[in-house]
Amino acid sequence: MPTRAAMNIIWGMGSAVKRPSAELEQLVALLAAGDVFVLTGAGASTDSGSPDYRDERGAWKHRAPMLFREFTATLAARRRYWARSLVGYTRLTRARPNAAHHALVELERRGGLSLTVTQNVDGLHEAAGSREVLDLHGRIDRVVCLGCRRAMPRAELQTALLRENPDWAERHADVTPDGDAELGAVDYSAFHIVDCAHCGGMLKPDVVFFGEGVPRSHVERAFGALERSRALLVVGSSLMVFSGFRFARRAAALGLPIAIVNRGVTRADELSGLRLRGNAGEILTSAIAGLAGAGTAAQRVF
Ligand SMILES: [Zn+2]
């Protein structure tokens, strides 16, 4: 067990941290055992300036994101998407890793994690320094051509979009987690989209849209890692989308303990024996302080 001094460090974070100590101790023990499979969602990035998709009850905060078939079906939908994306992109590039990302880097550095799988497309785990990361839903900083499958940096496309649509640069809007912006009633018909410079094909952000499947290779790699893990730790995801929920279901089938760190309810609460409600960065930072304070004592438990 941590010493009293160490526990004071853990709990000395002010009145914002209101959790029974038993839950944090359980999380510390779970992390001390090692081989933890981490699944992160939008809640891990909210302190980085990325807005969350859902509120604490799991309901949409914004209108639902654009569906894949809507994007590919009509020029009007792509105009609307890229116009909003052009406006939202600047804010997206300003996002920086927060305490939750840094805590997961530290846990990986200590050898405690098997794999970090993220539903986020912001690349902030890699930016923070995590090495073993699977971007389940792709990366918003890349664009892919649906014709020739060539990939290009999103920054290059931004330059091309601004060249074609210079008057859109000064617009301001609220931004959703995938870089889409809320522009309200706007006429998009004059917006010029940019096609692939190599084949003239349709460009799409290299992210998995709603209504589009996660690549099978991603799922297989993640399931393989989960099967070699001791526990599943969910950070900042309501798991309302099946692409994430399936890992909780598989972990439960494997008999692995499931810990959930999230602000609100999740779809996997029934499957989890350990739920910590609150800010992901604060809770994980406290857990690391607990690991440091517990030292080898926590490891002797296992
Ligand atoms: Zn192409």
Image (spheres, helix red, strand yellow):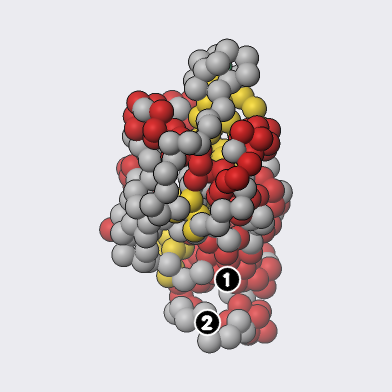
x and y percent of residue 258 in the render? 41, 55
Q: Which residue is at 40% across, 54% downward?
A: 184
- Kindly indicate whether the residue at mark 2 contacts the one at mark 1 (C-beta within 8 angstroms): yes
Q: Determine whether, in the image, residue 250 is placed left or right of residue 172.
A: left
Which of these two is toward me, 139 or 233? Answer: 139
Q: Is residue 7 left or right of residue 280?
A: right
Is residue 100 visible from the viewing direction of this image?
A: no
Percent position of residue 144, x then y: 56, 26
Q: Residue furthest left?
A: 270
In the rendered view, would you say 228 is above or below 69?
below
Residue that carries the numbered disc 1 in the rendered image: 282
Q: Amino acid at mark 1?
A: Glu
261 relative position to 289: left or right: left
Disc 2 marks which residue? Answer: 16
Of the numbered discs 1 and 2, the one sitting upstream in the chain is: 2
Residue at figure coordinates x 56%, y 53% from the top left: 171
Which quadrant is home to the N terminus? bottom right
Position of residue 149 measured from the top left corner of the image (x, y, whole percent): 55, 18
Q: From what the image shows, is residue 55 above or below residue 211?
A: below
**Element at badge 1?**
helix
Q: Nearer the viewer, residue 235 or 109?
A: 235
Residue located at (38% from left, 52% from top): 185
Q: Is residue 70 above or below residue 262?
A: above
